[in-house]
Image (cartoon, grey):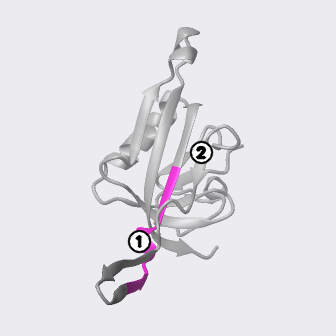
Amino acid sequence: MAKFAIFSTELGPSLNPAGMTPGPASLVVFDRDPMPDGNYDPYAGSTVRGSVIPTIGGVVVQDFGYQIKDQRIAISDSAAFSQTTVDALDLLYRVSSGEYYFTDGYECWKVQFSRPDGFIYRRHLVSSYWNVARFDYEINLVVKDIENV
């Protein structure tokens, strides 16, 4: 069973949202986790803001500190999702400014889909040739908070 899931926030964070009773109003459990064939980077964005500006007399370093909202989670895989999973994720993605929890089974984050490329999917042509509707996907999430579960 897959551990990766995106779910609504009304019941709070969880590492196993499928096991919650009652369950969340919205729950999408991945058909398969993106390991080992897909890509998963829970620290895709930089969480520290700043810049280094060369000057005639040296350098100016600007450090604006740690910003959790700069962290990104990037997930992708090939021939990994069914039509049902694509439809359920697309519904979540279409909600303007929708906030969800995302878990990989080990950590949980409050997230929002990135715009405009938060959820991209394509029919996998090899599986389609054999009359099996499977989809390649890319998910890009903006981290709003890290949840201690």
Is residue 112 shown left or right of residue 56? right
Q: Is residue 14 magenta?
A: no
Residue at 36% in and 87% down: 58
- Tag 1 secondary structure: helix
Is residue 91 shown left or right of residue 68? left
Quarter where residue 87 is shown: top left
- Tag 2 secondary structure: strand
Tell me which label, 1 or 2, sits earlier in the chain: 2
Residue at 47% in and 54% down: 25
Quadrant position of the N terminus in the picture = top right
Task: Name the mark on residue 69.
Answer: 1
- For the residue pair 107 and 54, the one nearer the viewer reads as 54
Q: Which residue is mark 2?
A: 39
Q: Which residues are magenta?
A: 62-74
- For the residue pair 5 and 142, the one nearer the viewer reads as 142
- For the residue pair 3 and 123, the one nearer the viewer reads as 123
**Residue 59 at x, y percent in the picture:** 36, 85
What is the chief secondary structure element of the magenta stretch?
Answer: strand
Is residue 98 shown left or right of residue 122? left
Q: Is residue 64 magenta?
A: yes
The kind of residue on which mark 2 rests is Asn
Residue at 54% in and 9% down: 129
In this rendering, the answer to whether 15 lies above or below 65 is above
The kind of residue on which mark 1 rests is Lys
**Residue 119 at x, y percent in the picture:** 40, 44
